[in-house]
Image (cartoon, rainbow, N blue to C red):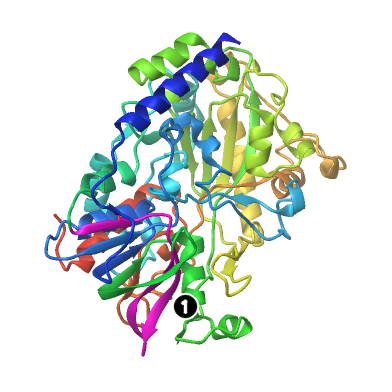
Amino acid sequence: MWGHVLISIVVLLTSLFYHYHFSEPASIIDYPETHYDYVVVGAGTSGCVIASRLSEMSNVTVLLVEAGGYFGWTSTIPLLAPMMQGTEVDWAYKTEPQVFSSRGFNGYRQNWPRGKGLGGSGQLNYLVHSFGRPEDYKRWPKGWSHADLLPYFQKVTDIMNVVPMPEEEYLTKAFILAEESLKLDNVSLRKAMYTAKRGSRWTTHHAYLQKAWNRKNLHILMNTLVTKILFKNNNIEGIKVMYKNGSIGRIGVRKEVILCAGTINTPQLLLISGVGPISELEKHKISVVRDLPEVGRNLFDHLNVPVYVNLRERVSITLVKLQTVPEVFNYFTFGTGWLATNGVMGLGRANNSGLLLFGVASAEEKLLKTISNFETETYRSLFPSYNDSMHEGFIYLVSCLQPKSRGSVTLRSSDIRDPPRINPAYLQDSDDVTCTYRAINFALETLNTRLFREYGAKVHIPDFEECRHLRPDYRDFDYSECVMRIAGLTGYHPCGTCRIGAVVDEELRVKGVSGLRIMDASVVPSPISGTPNSVLVAMAERASDIILDRSFN
């Protein structure tokens, strides 16, 4: 009880402090100029980098347009990332009903949160840092190889303040030591890295945009929806916008519009503006500007299968521990403790099998069911801690790092306010099932090592009615496949819907039109064996150099 009271008091005081000290930056405007040299659409991970870098050139004017506003102070606490989902700072998309997966979700649909506000999805993600593997980039177009991006990776590591999970965490230690015991080829088990500063979330909003948002040549227009890209004879003219009060406006551009609206919103905006597959445009009676068949295609995402591991020893993060007075005090006084982390203790790879150790044993059932869209029966079968806030355990999120299944983003209507149809087509390719099965077995192997045995680690086998005719053992292929098709959960890594080489050229210019570029997760050609956020920051740095025609510095 006292933990709840203390948290409430701290929340109130922090909120008052935040609002008292937070002054409006000079770049924030209510009404734009009639024309700008550059217009950046979307203030997400990439948009914050692009707007910041372009506005370093004092002889150009830059407008950053964002559909949302500010994220509240709650978003700064790393472990509270799930609290942002489903709020006004989330686009709160849902997939179409899935055919090959998501059978344990309401309506066979997954929730796809996307950040809406300054910082975008970087403000509600789990902050996990990764650049994937060098081989991920082997088939990427010229200029985007691992070697090309390496200097940008090094730059981003410094700017984004990449920090490791603290050494003293018991589960992190057990995870790292497991690598020595396994003695398998191509296996990597390491501490998780994440982007944080003094215990607070650290994103491109903090690292880039805040450093730029008092520049006279940068304007930031919030709570404004871009409804259409305006062309004249395939040349960019500007953008059409809808302000918060519902009024419509037009903003002209002299040089370029750079779309940074993300894997979902970027293809939607292109299609509504007449750029995309001619069949899709005609279906919605949209005038064709350019027939580009690949707009909205090639959608991919990691599918995480939660494997719960029970523990005997008190070494995990539980709700009861989080609500203690010392834990809350340490965070708000010193920026330390579990609240200052994202709860992700370790990351593992074995060929294309991926493993993420999430050290939170229990959470509030209603919250997690709401943000995941799990049916109650599915949720309770997966997580034995659902009704016990003292239960010790952790979650392995296992996945295929290089999924072959490809989905699409298409229009529901020609109205930009109507959410598009999102079909990730999880597990459509049978190779993804085999790959995920290997990842599950990789997770089981780690548990049979010294420290995990000392902690009493024992895998929990969910009792799904649909799987009861099978042997309840993850080592049984059919049982594992049954579980993954019921309980596989989005990895929150959607990419690929405007990929380099198909929709944009090697300099990110949209093919067949003039003055329009894209830089966001939609241009990523193929999956990254890890989380894509840090890669996108590096790509946005390179994109800025390309736009300004300057070499790396």
Name the residue that disc number 1 marks. Answer: 273
> From which residue to which does the magenta span run?
217-242
Q: Where the N terminus falls, by quadrant?
A: top right
Does 290 sit above or below residue 149?
below
Q: Of 87 and 517, which appears nearest the observer? A: 87
Q: Picture coordinates of residue 215 (x, y %)?
A: 18, 52
Residue positioned 24% across, 54% down in the render: 52
Which image quarter is the C terminus in? bottom left
Q: Is residue 338 visible?
A: no
* Amino acid tagged 1: Ser
Q: What element carries label 1?
A: loop
Work out which residue is located at the far left of the displayed protein and give it.
59
Q: Residue at x 35, y 42 (%)?
A: 203
The front one of 526 and 542 is 542
User: Which percent across, then down, holds residue 35?
Assistant: 26, 72
The stretch drawn in magenta includes residue 220: yes
Task: Give the residue displayed 68% in from the left and 44% down from the top.
Answer: 373
Name which residue lies at 59% across and 80% down. 280
